[in-house]
Image: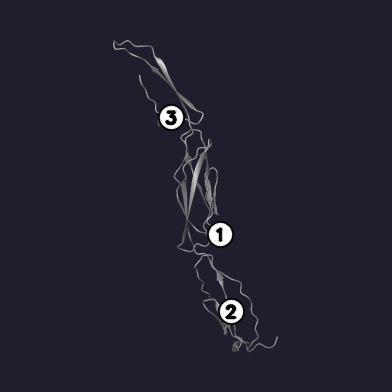
Amino acid sequence: GSYTLDPTDPSFNHLAMGEHQTLIIPVTATDNNGAQSAPQNLIIKINGTNDNPVVSHISSKTVDEGSAKINGQIAATDLDHGDSATFTTTYQHAGFALNPDGSYTFDPTDPSFNHLAVGEHQTLIIPVTATDNNGAQSAPQNLIIKIDGTNDIPVVSHISSKTVDEGGNKVTGQIAATDLDHGDTATFTTSYQHAGFVLNPDGSYTFDPTDPSFNHLAVG
């Protein structure tokens, strides 16, 4: 007449908080001469508890810096039927947003990634947890986003104008450029050619107003 019941059996996992399942088990006794009793019920009531949600596997993403915005959806499972999950993360980075329903967006055009040069990478490891409507929280699952650097275009800085007298002293100058990709260097060129003017690959230049090509200029 001894018995056991294991409430951890998976068949009870579907019971959510506030739900119940009742087992009504009729038990009869038979003596050694075959006489049998009327049945008597063993009644066991199983109260549901709040099982933790589980964040589903999250696929990793690889994007190019400066490429189009990407969207994704994170999901979770919960053994308690009827439970819903809210998603959160402690991680913050410009360009990334996680919504409570598990949808997320990532913008590789965010300026925080502009420093990445060709061949460089930045990896975001974003822990995501799910909390069900009864407060149970999952273990974190990582969303991994890898950003590959691309070659940003250099920008020639403002160049100051010069005014000189024909026949005056030679002038020199320096042209500069900026590049968002750290470590990149620039070489300067021009399609323009004129006697007396020289532009060097490093951006330095010279101009000689004594060049004979300017001798024809009269006063005024």
Q: Which residue is mark 1?
A: 111
The residue sitting at 57% across, 82% down in the picture is 206
Q: Residue at x 60, y 87 (%)?
A: 213
Report the disc number at residue 12.
3
SS for tag 2?
Answer: strand
Residue ID at (39%, 14%): 39
Residue at the location (43% across, 29% down)?
A: 12
Please identify the quadrant where the N terminus is shown. Answer: top left
Residue reaching furthest to the front: 2
Residue 104: x %, y % from top left: 53, 48
> In which image quadrant can residue 176 be found?
bottom right
Q: Nearer the viewer, mark 2 or mark 3?
A: 3
69 or 26, nearer to the observer: 26
- Residue type at numbered disc 3: Phe
Tell me the crowding category of disc 2: few under 14, some 14 to 19, or many 20 or more residues within 10 angstroms, Cα based.
Answer: few
Q: Given the image, on which type of amino acid does mark 1 rest?
A: Pro
Q: Earlier in the sequence, mark 1 or mark 3?
A: 3
Marks 1,3: beta carbons within 8 A: no
Name the N-terminal-most of marks 1 and 2. 1
* Disc sitting over residue 173 in the figure: 2
Q: Secondary structure at mark 1?
A: helix
Q: CA distance from mark 1 to mark 3?
A: 51 Å
As helix, strand or loop, the secondary structure at mark 3 comes to helix
